[in-house]
Amino acid sequence: MNGVHDMGGLECFGPINPDANEPLFHDAWEKRVLAMTVCIGASGEWNLDQGRFTRESLPPVDYLSIGYYRIWLTALERLLIRRNLVSLAEMESGHSIDKAKSVKRVLRAEELDAVLRAGAPVDRPASSPAAFAEGDCVRIENQHKAGHTRLPSYIRGHVGIVHKIHGCHVFADDNALGTGENPQWLYNIKFKAQDLWGEARRQAAFVHVDCWEPYLSAAADA
Amino acid sequence: MSEDHDHHHHHDHSHLDDTALRVRSLETVLTEKGYIDPEALNRLIDTYENQVGPKNGAAVVARAWVDEEYRQWLLKDATAAIASLDFSGRQGEHMVVVENTPQEHNMVVCTLCSCYPWPVLGLPPSWYKSAPYRSRVVIDPSSVLAEFNVTLPEGTRITVWDSTAEVRYLVLPMRPAGTDQLSGAKLAELVTRDSMIGTGLPLSPAALGKDDSHKNRSSTNAPNSQP
């Protein structure tokens, strides 16, 4: 879905204002939101890409203004309601009312270190050879999907070079639909900055973007 | 003006309290329903507040600076090379390290959300997750560097890496001049978080010396490791 989260190339947001002495969290509740989101992820009720799609589907004005951990909180609430894990009445009352739904897993404190250390690798065995090789010229498909995609708009339609083949990875666009992982070859594609932004912006020599094979088609040499 | 300001302040304040209550309510519901273990939450927070952070990445960089074999391994198979130092896991499952050279400076971003290599850098700073950085660094990285007070030598190419998939990028900055005598531990102190994102450069040994005067020196490896 074309949305405001896909902001690469916009220049309307003003200065970055980095704060060298910034605390890791600005409020105690931010820590709980981060931890709740990560821990309940273990329930298996939604995957990483569905979580991302929920966050980027918030109303654009909210997405740009409520702050990072409020985006996480709002998305978490939405997912809990949609999966019938928590009801609106429960959220409003702050207490459990209905019987809990049985979930695949509850992450216990004693398991936490091992779970964080293991992570969740997304590389999968390939069912077919990679269509492109390092050095190949590829054109980025001009796709505008209705659902989740990790194809940023600023590279659509452009030509780049296959810089590296990462392997076969869970395809985020399909994983977000909840219809399976549908692993696809993942490539790092190298773009000349002036191809993306015009001659005037040539100081950024190159921009590299990771792209799954369904985002790509063969192109004549640039 | 001042009325306006007061009003704003007031509004923000109650907004914050509302959010804190909302979060507490949600955590209570999830705990009562048995979906979460509050102790696991505490442990996760402790992990990212006190254990996992840019010190990990700095150890990786310092090792690459003193160990050529390790540097080559890191550039070829960063996931394995980093795991060999015992840093691995969530949001660092698939690592790639990109090396700065006199010709090329690398910068990392996630234009679509906030992807960041947690096992080596910890949780991202606010600016990394913010719209101004995410949007502008791919089109005008030199203006971003200027905001971070970074000046590159004339003619340095800038390469930007957009983390759109589950691959996470770490910049291997150049070893500062005048550090030949420094031990690995001292070198690691020169490696800032921002130098591993590409919005900064490592500290100079002179800066480290200044820093040291305020620090407990007991962690210093050897008396002659001072610049």
Image (cartoon, rainbow, N blue to C red):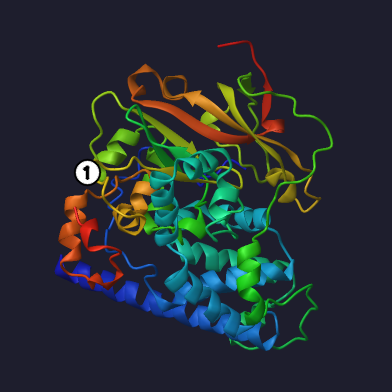
Is residue A106 at least partly visible in the picture?
yes
Counting from the top left corner in percent of width and height, residue A93 is at 60, 87
* Vertical arrangement, residue A190 with respect to residue A100, above or below: above
Quadrant occupied by the N terminus of chain B: bottom left
Q: Residues within 10 Å of mark 1 (few under 14, many from 20)?
A: few
Is residue B130 at least partly visible in the picture?
no
* Vertical arrangement, residue A152 with respect to residue B21, above or below: above
Count the numbered circles shown: 1
Nearest to the observer: residue A140 or residue B47? B47
Instruction: Please give left or right for residue B173 compared with residue B75 in the image.
Output: left
The residue wearing badge 1 is: B178
Describe the element under mark 1 as helix, strand or loop: loop
Counting from the top left corner in percent of width and height, residue A19 is at 27, 58
Nearest to the observer: residue A200 or residue B202? B202
Counting from the top left corner in percent of width and height, residue A9 is at 43, 35
Residue at the image point whose x is 34% and y is 35% from the top: B141
Which corner quadrant of the image does residue A48 belong to?
A: bottom right
Instruction: Please give left or right for residue B140 compared with residue B5 in the image.
Output: right
The chain under label 1 reads: B
Residue at the image point whose x is 63% and y is 59% from the top: A51
Outermost right residue: A127
Instruction: Please give left or right for residue B61 compared with residue B212 in the image.
Output: right
- Tag 1: amino acid: Gly
Residue at the image point whose x is 23% and y is 37% from the top: B151
* Vertical arrangement, residue A10 with respect to residue B35, above or below: above
Counting from the top left corner in percent of width and height, residue A142 is at 63, 26
